């Protein structure tokens, strides 16, 4: 604010104390406060405070829910069996060979169990750490490539995007893969920037190559195919053929194979059947065929992306368009690289005949950086609209929330939904308030405060909903039955799973079971070792009658069939999903 004034009347005299030249600006205290609210990203104490808050929120809810079957129970149990058997090469689930996925996540979880004990947060730790590293590194990349504000915004956007933040709280191979691919992307961007020194370029490229090897160990060849295809497409569009000379291919390939190859070689030597099953059946056939019954319509991932990118949905179209705008005249074009990354991965999995929600998680870091660039340049109106979209979503969710308890006719499921309902309503109120407050900040030109408000709104809302799932996941996992069953399981007691495999319950019981009349995803392993299961009911019942001590986990319909046949059994525990019985008729 410019003033034409002076400060008059020194004590004891009439002369001006100071003369202020015409048109010279004076910054008053409230002007400084306004500037500080606009430039929060420049305050180191403030950044450290936000870092601590987001870190606590990120890891706080890891242990308040039981492991959700099948995925969380499956990978926790494989890790437990690795630790129990000491075999880190041939991965097994329920004692049966399981080669559908590489072992990195199971190795990391087994190490967490070894040093931190068995539990939910230990089972989820690798996914949470992988996604957390992705957030931090993306913030550093945005800061280095563009400026401090873009880095600050990029980290906030990724950490608060509903799908990324939510997936980080589950033991999922997709979030582990996505965390490694984020390191691949960031390493590549940092290595190829114009001003980088040669040593730094080499080091960042080696980080990228190492992360790509870990991505392959996370979920197979896709960890190499995705970044490789992006690089080819980027080269064709940018005509930057020299990028291939800047990749440090020799050193990079040596490092890649040194990390990725040993397990594949060792597991193939011990299990000759591995290579065909893993590379052909699990990857080529899964992508091209519908044999896994995971197909979806062409718009499958569009429907998932729209809520998944909240609270930034209102800025998504502009952010993608902004990526097409011209970049400074330089050899490397980072915005084009980000756009190619998003577009190729999105369309690659949209074309696939096997679709699951987590498949497009790797696009979120690139989207976050594009949204951060848009946030830096966005008009006040655009930022007001972004906050308004979140407020409207919260309002719609609040109107829908009372119906959650009526989504299931099963009394136990309905009870857990009733618990969830209150948490969802709280999340919707937070979304409404956060959206409105963010719009107000935008209206008053407090850019950093508005972005931070939306980010906290997104992350807190996700954590509230996840916390509300505790009753539902406790029920699905069978955790509430463990206290009743464990006293029945002496060291010599046999455990059977009849017509089903209860992924999380067997982890909590810390026992493998003999499968009866059940194959499903175990069919490959049981083809190799058929003696590990019983596929004939009468053979099982004969063993059941003669076992000194046995417990069986039954599907409810099979339990009724056994009752009708007067099979000797005593109910130990039950709910609507399973019945646990013992062949000892008294205790």
Image: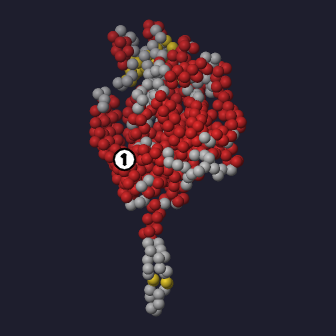
Residue 187 higher or lower than 229, as above or below? below
Q: Position of residue 519 (x, y in %)?
A: 48, 16
Q: Position of residue 484 (x, y in %)?
A: 42, 26
Q: Position of residue 531 (x, y in %)?
A: 55, 12
Judge whether residue 132 can be spotted in this image. Answer: no
Residue 208 higher or lower than 69, as above or below? below
Q: Tag 1, which secondary structure? A: helix
On the picture, is 244 further left or further right than 352?
Answer: right
Count of number-bearing discs:
1
Q: Image quadrant for the C terminus?
A: top left
Name the residue nearer the viewer: 4 or 516.
4
Q: How is the image coloured?
A: secondary structure
Q: Quadrant of residue 66?
A: top left
Name the residue nearer the viewer: 244 or 303.
244
Residue 236 higher or lower than 431, as above or below? above
Which residue: 49% across, 30% down? 349
Q: Quadrant of residue 545?
A: top left
Residue, disc 1: 390
Q: Image quadrant for the N terminus?
A: bottom left
| Label 1 Cα crowd, 10 Å radius (few <14 / some 14-19 / many 20+) | many
Which residue: 48% across, 35% down? 346
Which residue: 62% across, 47% down? 331
Judge whether residue 499 can be spotted in this image. Answer: yes
Name the residue nearer the viewer: 584 or 115.
115
């Amino acid at each position: 604010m410019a003033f034409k004034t002076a400060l008059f009347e020194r004590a004891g005299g009439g002369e001006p104390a100071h003369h202020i030249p015409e048109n010279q600006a004076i910054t008053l205290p409230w002007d400084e406060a306004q500037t500080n609210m606009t430039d929060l990203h420049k305050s180191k104490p403030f950044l450290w405070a936000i870092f601590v808050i987001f870190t606590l929120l990120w890891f706080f809810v890891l242990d308040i829910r039981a492991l959700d079957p099948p995925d969380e129970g499956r990978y926790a149990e494989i890790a437990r069996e690795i630790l129990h058997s000491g075999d880190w090469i041939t991965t097994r689930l329920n004692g049966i060979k399981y080669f559908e996925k590489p072992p990195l996540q199971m190795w990391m979880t087994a190490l967490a169990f070894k040093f931190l004990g068995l539990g939910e947060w230990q089972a989820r730790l690798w996914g949470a750490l992988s996604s957390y590293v992705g957030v931090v590194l993306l913030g550093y990349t945005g800061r280095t490539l563009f400026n401090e504000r873009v880095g600050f915004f990029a980290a906030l956007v990724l950490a608060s995007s509903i799908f990324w933040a939510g997936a980080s709280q589950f033991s999922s191979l997709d979030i582990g893969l996505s965390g490694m691919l984020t390191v691949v992307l960031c390493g590549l961007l940092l290595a190829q920037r114009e001003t980088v020194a040669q040593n730094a370029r080499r080091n960042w490229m080696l980080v990228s190559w190492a992360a790509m090897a870990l991505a392959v160990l996370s979920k197979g060849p896709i960890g190499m195919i995705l970044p490789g295809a992006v690089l080819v497409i980027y080269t064709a569009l940018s005509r930057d053929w020299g990028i291939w000379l800047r990749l440090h291919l020799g050193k990079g390939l040596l490092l890649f194979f040194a990390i990725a190859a040993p397990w594949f070689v060792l597991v193939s030597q011990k299990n000759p059947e591995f290579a065909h099953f893993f590379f052909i059946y699990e990857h080529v056939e899964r992508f091209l065929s519908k044999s896994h019954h995971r197909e979806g319509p062409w718009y499958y991932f569009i429907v998932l992306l729209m809520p998944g990118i909240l609270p930034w949905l209102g800025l998504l179209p502009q952010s993608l368009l902004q990526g097409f705008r011209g970049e400074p005249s330089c050899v490397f074009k980072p915005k084009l690289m980000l756009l190619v990354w998003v577009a190729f991965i999105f369309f690659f999995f949209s074309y696939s005949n096997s679709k699951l929600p987590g498949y497009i998680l790797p696009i979120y870091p690139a989207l976050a950086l594009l949204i951060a660039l848009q946030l830096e340049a966005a008009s006040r109106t655009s930022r007001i609209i972004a906050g308004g979209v979140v407020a409207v979503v919260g309002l719609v969710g609040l109107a829908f929330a009372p119906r959650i308890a009526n989504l299931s006719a099963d009394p136990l499921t309905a009870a857990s939904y009733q618990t969830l309902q209150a948490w969802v309503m709280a999340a919707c109120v937070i979304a409404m308030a956060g959206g409105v407050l963010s719009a107000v900040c935008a209206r008053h030109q407090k850019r950093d405060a508005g972005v931070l408000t939306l980010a906290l709104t997104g992350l807190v809302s996700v954590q509230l909903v996840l916390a509300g799932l505790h009753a539902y996941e406790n029920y699905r996992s069978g955790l509430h039955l463990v206290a009743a069953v464990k006293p029945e399981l002496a060291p010599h007691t046999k455990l059977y799973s009849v017509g089903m495999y209860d992924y999380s319950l067997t982890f909590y019981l810390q026992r493998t079971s003999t499968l009866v009349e059940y194959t499903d995803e175990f069919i490959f392993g049981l083809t190799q070792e058929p003696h590990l299961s019983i596929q004939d009911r009468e053979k099982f019942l004969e063993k059941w009658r003669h076992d000194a001590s046995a417990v069986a986990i039954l599907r409810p319909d099979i339990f009724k069939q056994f009752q009708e046949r007067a099979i000797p059994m005593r109910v130990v525990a039950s709910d609507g999903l399973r019945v646990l019985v013992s062949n000892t008729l008294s205790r």
